[in-house]
Image: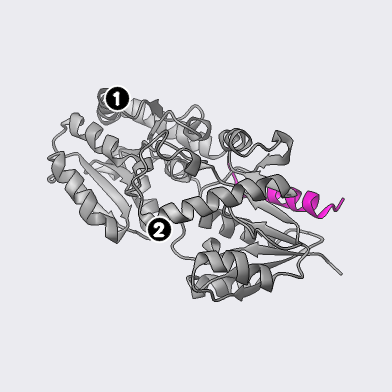
Amino acid sequence: MRPVIAVDARYGLRYPRRGVGEYVYQVMKGLKDRDRPYDLILYGDSSCDPTTVEEMRSWYTVEILAAPNFFLWEQVVWPRASAKANLLHGTANIAPLWGSVPQILTIHDVIEWHRGRDFPSQIPWRHHLSRLYRMNALQKLAPRARGILTVSQHARGDICDVLGVDAERVQVSPLAGKYPIQSEPKSEAETSPPYLLTLGAIDPRKNLVDVLRAFGQVKRPGLVLRVVGVEEQGCAKLEAMVRNFGLEASVEVQTMVSDSRLQELFGGALAFLYLSRYEGFGLPLLEAMSQGCPVIYAKASSLPEVAGEAGSGVDSQDGDAIAEEIRHLADDPGYRLFQQRAGLKRARDFSWDLTVEKTHEGYMRALEVR
């Protein structure tokens, strides 16, 4: 009988998907065509998108499990439903704390150990409870896992330092973009009127304050900053921040947008600003480069590793340097074209095929299959 791997697929079965969800979705989509000596069962919850579930059911067994909250799903309902599996894959920094089924973990980052130390920690009280639970759980789960996958060399080193695991037990499985990589940058005519793009999570880690501060120093008539992907409950807070900087006339705030719309926005932007203070990988940076969008990113955590030789790495608090880079991109078409092509070249270094291959290798080791 073929061994069975039980996968926590909750985030990959949702739509729209953010980083962790895109990772789970793309890995499961890639494994469907792979010659493998094991079967996969995907487990989701009530938040799953019916269309995505049906898509995955054309390739795998998918079970939707009901639970009143994420803690009971992760620690009671899912482990009970998958008790006869040969391996559990915790895809999102968590897995069951009890049970006899061996585990492989994907630990995307150890951000929670950095909150309040390396960047502010203004998060809701419910997030504090979740943070405490996940930090304590990971400290117990990581040492006993049969294998750990992570998304960057930076995250690998951080995981080893924080959780005290040996480096040889942690395998890097880089991410890739969700969009086809453009063959050529868009022309100047296709990027008018000019706008800058950034993402709008209110979490202090994402550092929208420094984005707004730097944009305020550009002082370029007609240039707009589009902030997209803002959760509805965060719109009022973000709009207050915009007013505080006196930028109401030049900042556009949008809530969540579709994947296709975000692709269009990346493709047409003068530049993508990503001044996050900590990322395990930084998928939006790669997705922007894949659409020929020049990137300005914080020289922090994994972002320089992802950008490689492309884009402009900056001190996120150096508003003068960021403003000067924006003006350079706006005023020098040759420089902008150089940055577009550098980003496209770097984006081609990443592929979901590699992510799938590394995940398969992790499964084979954890199952002790040669």
Q: Could you say which is closer to the camera, residue 39 or residue 245? A: 245
Q: Secondary structure under badge 2?
A: helix
The answer to whether 50 appears left or right of 205 in the picture is right
Examine the rendered structure and indicate whether residue 202 appears above or below residue 50: above
Q: Residue at x 44, y 45 (%)?
A: 284
Examine the rendered structure and indicate whether residue 190 appears above or below residue 59: above
Magenta residues? 349-370
The answer to whether 143 appears left or right of 297 in the picture is right
Q: Position of residue 195 (x, y in %)?
A: 25, 42
Judge the density around disc 2: few (<14), some (14-19), many (≥20) Cα neighbours within 10 Å: few
Examine the rendered structure and indicate whether residue 79 appears above or below residue 350: below
Question: What's under tag 2, amino acid-wise?
Answer: Arg
Task: Name which of mark 1 and mark 2 comes first in the sequence.
Answer: 2
The answer to whether 150 appears left or right of 124 in the picture is right
Q: Quadrant of residue 118?
A: top left
Q: Residue at x 33, y 46 (%)?
A: 122
Q: Position of residue 264 (x, y in %)?
A: 36, 52
Q: Quadrant of the N terminus?
A: bottom right
Q: Residue at x 60, y 34 (%)?
A: 153
For residue 311, say whether it is visible: yes
Q: Position of residue 348 (x, y in %)?
A: 55, 39
Q: How many marks?
A: 2
Question: What's under tag 1, amino acid-wise?
Answer: Asp
Disc 1: which residue: 318
